[in-house]
Image: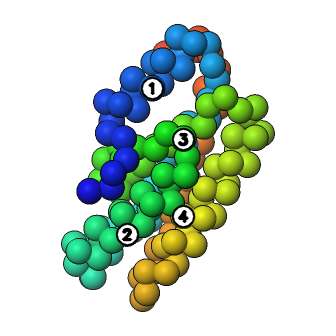
Amino acid sequence: MTGLLNRRSLEQTCDQLQRSQQGYLLAVVDADDFKTINDVFGHLEGDRVLIGMAQGLRQARYAARWGGEEFLVLFPALEPHEALERLQSVITDTQGLLDTLGPLAVTMSVGAVWVEPGRRGSRH
């Protein structure tokens, strides 16, 4: 429905980045109160929200629908501060698209982490 990468493709991309010793910013983007959108406005409107989010997040080099209303985006080949700036730009543009959906007030929550090369799965 969204045209984004699937979970498996994104996991493979993360594995490739780790093997290449390339750091990347990994961000989780979630539509706030998505269940309420589906319950109040219906699943067709919920689908419009998901499609709108996907359209905005597609600006990232790698974006995937992780599950439900959760999306993951990766920003490799940048310095951490550059990746964060790029994420902020993508989120601003995505919110702009969501704001055009009419009477729906859709907001997003975002969390991000810089993944260092060779550090995946290590415990401290």
Label 1 belongs to which residue? Answer: 13
Expressed as whole percent of the image width and height from the top left, the position of residue 18 reads 54, 16
Question: Viewed as shown, does residue 27 lie left or right of 77?
Answer: left
- Say the numbered circle drawn on residue 94: 4
Residue at the spot 57% in from the left edge and 12% down from the top edge: 20
The answer for how far apart the CA atoms under marks 1 and 3 are is: 11 Å
- Say which element carries label 1: helix
Alpha carbons under labels 3 and 2: distance apart: 21 Å
Q: Amino acid at mark 3?
A: Arg
CB under 8 Å between discs 4 and 3: no
Quadrant location of the C terminus in the rendered image: top right
Which is nearer the N-term, disc 3 or disc 2?
A: 2
Neighbour class for label 4 at 10 Å: few (<14), some, many (≥20)?
many
Q: Which circle's residue, 2 or 4, is located before the other in the chain?
A: 2
Q: Amino acid at mark 2?
A: Val
Q: Are marks 2 and 4 in contact (CB under 8 Å)?
A: no
As drawn, the label of residue 49 is: 2
In whole angstroms, how far apart are the C-alphas of marks 4 and 3?
Answer: 14 Å
